[in-house]
Image: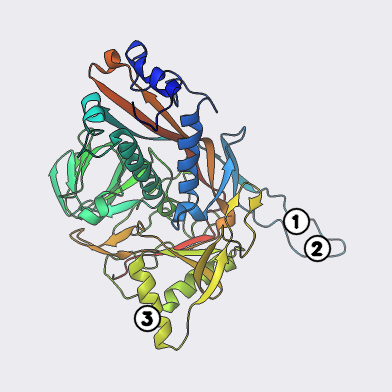
Amino acid sequence: MSQDTSLAEFISQTQRGLHGRVFGPDFLKKNTYLTTASTTFQQTYGRKIWDALNNRTVMYNALKKVAWGSTAGWVLRTDRGSGRMRAVTETGALPTIDVSNYQGVYTLPKIIAADFGVPIKSIVVNTLEGGMGDILATELQATERDFVKGVNQQLMAGSAHSISASGTSATFTVPTGVCEHFKIGDTINWYDQSASTYRAPTAITVSSIDTTTGEVTLSGAATAGGQDLAAGDVVYVIARSGLTGLDDICMEDAAAVGGKGSAVDVYNVTTRTAGTYAAAANVSYSGTGVGRALTLNMIDACIQKVRERGGEPKLITMGWDQYFNLERLLNAHQRYMGQETFQVGVGDERTLEGTRTGLVLSTYMGIPILPDPDAPKSETASGAAALGSNVYVLDTDYIEIAVAMQPQYIENRDFFAANAMVVRGLIYMMAETRCTRFDVQAKVADLLA
């Protein structure tokens, strides 16, 4: 018996065979049922992941978090009405009555999960001399990192991409730096370049993704109107299996991608026509699929359009490639990025400006800049190569992460159920991105790296 092990711990461990656990029944016991605050592991690992999600300089960190609440949606005012305001003479008729148009937005929380498994033999052998130590804890820590990364990648996933090649009616290929923007379970439609029309196959979802080749496999044959997917067509997401992304929010009806069309849906919103109250501001600035160098005029145009619609940009996010491009632009004009703190919101609470819990960021025109390595990239019109990352100008007052359940950790050691001598762990949460105004969110695409 080790000198570091207490008698109670030793006795507890000797009973592990009786309880089917590596440790005794009360040694940091992990339950396979779900409760809000049931055990030491539940509280420790759930809170650890929650802290990690909210203390990393990535886009997920910058958005305010709110409790889901007793709601399944909200209302968007999509039309202000027309002709109901005019000058009236002393005895003239009153303006014609016209009402605003409201559209209900409905959404439910998305379940995000990451699991792992470790054989019992590995757990025992790795505690011996020359082993890795506690392999279960090591694998759990790795899964935590993957979970945090995966949540941010869902939030930053691109929404529409040109096809470089079609293998079969149920597979297509995009650049390897772009394919990961599609997530397993995403429902897709596509724009048929040859017929210049939109195709809507029935409930076709993404079933697998090969990040080495860029090939995306679908759950069935993407055939509509007698046509299959082909090189040059545009595939776009109409329903996310995970979090709704910023790129989904910043798209509008018929947004150009690689010089062709797209019709990205978000929630159940069916109309986001350019130029209307419900449209995103300055959707892609080009949409031609021809790479262009980033200019200050492009960012200024986004800021202008957001402000013209009554918003105020609170955050600019981009990939590191565009961050360095912007820095070189400002240096060439002898203008320098300022430094500003960005306050993170949780519900109605916000971090105090200047505290260590806030983010210290560079700024442009007083707007904080948050570089995110997961920022989506555009691609060439043929879909053969990825371009640089997009730039997003956001009014984050109208974007939030609604959380129905914070990250939970559960563990299963039922060897009979698994039909294998393995310990399985699962980390999961329930949340969804909400945007209550699309018209004050903007992006610039088709940029060179």
34 lies above or below 441: above
> Answer yes or no: do the residues labelled 3 and 1 have beta carbons within 8 Å?
no
x, y percent for residue 34: 48, 23
The label nearer to you, 3 versus 1, is: 3
- Of badges 3 and 2, the one in the foreground is 3
Determine the CA span between mark 3 and mark 1.
54 Å
First in sequence, mark 3 or 2: give its number: 2
* Residue 444 in picture, x, y percent from top left: 40, 66
Where 27 sits versus 405, above or below?
Answer: above
Of residues 159 and 56, the one drawn nearer to the viewer in this rendering = 56
From what the image shows, is residue 82 above or below residue 222? Answer: below
The numbered mark, 3 or 1, whose residue comes first in the sequence reads 1
Residue 224 visible to the viewer? no
> Circle 1 sits in a helix, a strand or a loop, which is it?
loop
In this figure, which residue is indicated by the disc labeled 3? Answer: 328
340 relative position to 407: left or right: right
Sequence-first disc among 2 and 1: 2
Residue at the spot of label 1: 95
Q: Amino acid at mark 3?
A: Arg
Residue at horizontal 32 percent and vertical 52 percent from the top: 160
Residue extending farthest to the top is: 18
Task: Pick the residue in front: 284 or 313.
Answer: 313
Q: Amino acid at mark 2?
A: Val
The residue wearing badge 2 is 88
Say whether marks 2 and 1 touch (CB < 8 Å).
yes
Q: Are marks 3 and 2 in contact (CB under 8 Å)?
A: no
Q: CA distance from mark 3 to mark 2?
A: 56 Å
Q: Count residues near mark 2 (Cα–Cα under 10 Å), then give few for <14, some for 14-19, many for 20+.
A: few
